[in-house]
Image: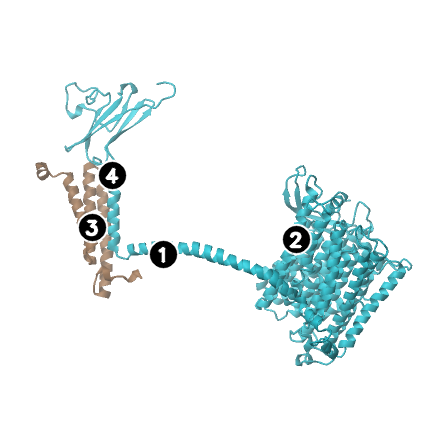
Amino acid sequence: MPDTAPQFLGLPLFAWVILLPLVGAFVNLVLGRWLSRQTVHVVAVGVVVAAFAIALCAIFFPSGDWSLLYKFKHRTDEASPEVVAHLFSWIQVGTPNDSWFLNIGMDFRLDTLSSVMVLIITGVGSLIHLYSTGYMSDEKRYSAYFGYLNLFTGSMLILVLAANMPVMFIGWEGVGLCSFLLIGFWFENPDYATAGRKAFVVNRIGDFAFLLGMFLLWYVLNHGQSLAPGLDFADLRSDAAQHVYTMKDGFFGTDRWATIIGILLFIGACGKSAQIPLYVWLPDAMAGPTPVSALIHAATMVTAGVYMVCRLGFLFAASTTAMMVVATIGTATALIAAFYAFAQTDMKKVLAYSTVSQLGFMFAAAGTGNWVAAIFHLGTHAFFKAGLFLGAGSVMHGMAGSGDITKMGGLKKHMPITRATFLIYCLAIAGFPLLSGFFSKDEILGGLWALGHWGHHPEGWPDWYGNFLWITLLIAALGTAVYMWRLYFLVFEGEERSETAEHAHESPWTMWVPLAVLALLAAFAGVIGLPHLTGTKLPWFTHALSSWLAPSIDEATELALHNSDNATYELMGVASLVGIAGIGIAWWLYGRGPSKKVETWTAEGHLLHEPYIASKNKLWVDELYDLVIVRPFRAVARGLFEIVDRFIIDTVFVGGWAFLVGILSRISRWVQNGQVQRYIVGIVIGAAAIFFFASRGHHAGIAYREIPQGVELKADPGAGLSGVGVKYRWDVDNDGQWDKKPDAAADDTSDAAYIDTPTRLVRRGDIGSEVTLWIIPKSGGKGETVTEAIVFAPSEGSK
Amino acid sequence: MSDLFTHVGYGHFLALSAVLFTIGVAGVLLRRNILIIMMSIELMLNAANLTILTFARMHGDLSGHSFALIVIAVAAAEVAVGLAIVVALFRGRRHVDVDRITMLKH
């Protein structure tokens, strides 16, 4: 089928979704200092909104045959709905015929799974960019902030649109970098800078495992065969590759390749998506500006791990062990993070732990092969959690920057719009019936229930495990409702507990409009993923998400995730009860401000004292890390610093050279003392020495060389006689007589009779075995006599 | 031996020039008065001139003479500049002792 997709500057339409934010980042970061604030935010918001519009076009454009929707409607087994852009060949080693072939292209692919992510990133991203123009209006480094935000958006789009793993890794690192830059955006505060560093370092640990997993995957698929030379997701998904995943691994020989690779990749996901044990950076990441928390640390970047696991679902599905690891870690994280959230008094900290917990829900879904539910919850969570963060930002904006909930209360009178939207988000996240969070969480819980009850589970998966996870997650869901509503009541209800709260004010329209839009989405986004009820006739759009995702995600066939209608109703009832009960408990305790009951219970010596302290201190995990990792690491670093840096480099090398130079300069200082006369003494002595050595041993001699006509002799008078008028007397034929000129008489002994030239040309036959030369000064006195043996070089041919 | 005193040849010129040059060097090295030093420099230049002329005559080559003329011109220029500096120095300091003129040293 000819590709009729519209192009712009030679690139397919959807590639511009990635490029536009990067262009915006370039403009704001490089040219930002010369731009006015207005230009900066028009560019920054403009590119993201434009990217959103282009993404909508590329995905849903109604006419023509090039949109993703058209391809989706006309899909066949051969043509899965996708649009591919090959920009250039990135890394190529070897040829397809070699035993090793690496061929990575800068490829991007828009398919149904990435389209969901692209819409979330650009859609929620647009709202948050708009919100930022209000929230950051007093910021000095305005263009840098928007530059980073644009760069983040571009990197995230690279991550989700990448057609192969190395390109995905570019985005993966790019978002990590932007996260670091934005967490530490107010780096004048050393705590914030530390938080940024912590996020970066913890992420690096995950990234390293991700790299290892990627390398191993390439190795496994490309030794002896060339199944996926570029780690393209389409190649990874092929039947041949899937067969390789199920083979015994070559390292331990105990499990499948998919187990090792899957767990390594999942550690990467743990770093990016803040799962146990690498979640510690996310609460600290709240040091960044609040819109950043909303965009990066709630809606998009932290979901990259979930996206990656879903994208490689076929790989994880090949290993029960890997699936159990993912599901267990996800569930444990969901529970523990919810536990932490209870005792936090900072608004953003509560939301941060809530995010960690909700990401745990997503991994629990992904770990049970319930990919659609994971992506569904990812989407709804993006709406309500971004909204919650933006709401928190709005509250903090009204509260002069403070996020301490013990100082708030009664804000509903002062911030009606923020309060109304916050209410909707809290209902959604608590799982109040018919709101988006209810349906998405219900899908996850329903999947777990099905796993335990209908006997459909992968080989080696214990029967009781699904139920166990279900119960655990249900407790986490109850906890979610309680702590979120505790937050709501403490912030908006009751009496004002501080001066600032009494003077709180509503935020400007740039801030509340995004809140309102997100509230609508948080309320109604659930309709695209209603549960499958065979007994009812629901319209098509209620299952839009699962059918839309079907071509990109392999429904794990062994894992039947659907319950019967009755079970579904019952589960929905249970979930509703849990949500409403949680809200009820929170109202009972905190409905009229800070609770006296909780204070008594958690006081010293009472029942809940220890758990409360444990929650407040986050189970001392940071302290544990400090003790086990940070301190030993510091000790080693200090040792290296003292030995290698201080001693070897500083003392021996740097200090040693300085010492040597010092000695030498002391000597030269004595010589170079500024007295011109002393210099001249040096010059005179030096000149005399040069003359002495140059003339010493340079005696008179004869130089000769062979030429075709014979031998050329050349007299060298030597140092003693140079420059003085001399006579030359030759005895070439070695007869003991001075050679005479041919026409001279035999008895003539005057000067004119002898050959008197410094150079002579003699035939070879006329020359004796020795040549003797006399050099006699014309002014009289002793001359020099030189005898030179003539040795001919062994000549070639004629002699 | 008698030749040395009766017959004036190239060797005598060269010897004179060497003696003049050595006196000049000694003057530059040992004296502290700039005027004397400049006179010594002149002496060395003229010793060099004498050598050049001697060799020019020895080889029968006129280019040595033109060399000597150039050296005389340059020496005149050098003396003009040098004396100007000396006068300027003297006006400021009332002495021309090189050991005490150390302004550029530090």
In the displayed structure, A666 sits above or below A419; it is: above
Say whether marks 4 and 2 touch (CB < 8 Å).
Answer: no
The residue indicated by pointer 2 is A209
Q: Badges 1 and 2: C-beta atoms under 8 Å apart?
A: no
What quarter of the picture does the N terminus of chain A occupy? top right
Front residue of A303 and A208: A208
- In primary-sequence order, the first of circles 4 and 1 is 1
Question: Disc 2 residue type?
Answer: Ala
Which element type, helix, strand or loop, lies under badge 1?
helix
- Amino acid marked by disc 1: Gly
Callout 3 amino acid = Val
Q: Chain of mark 3?
A: B
Please give the residue where the numbered disc 3 appears in the rendered image.
Answer: B25
**Label 4 belongs to which residue?**
A695
For disc 1, the chain is A
Residue marked by disc 1: A662
Question: Does mark 4 fall on the same chain as mark 3?
Answer: no
Amino acid beneath label 4: Ser
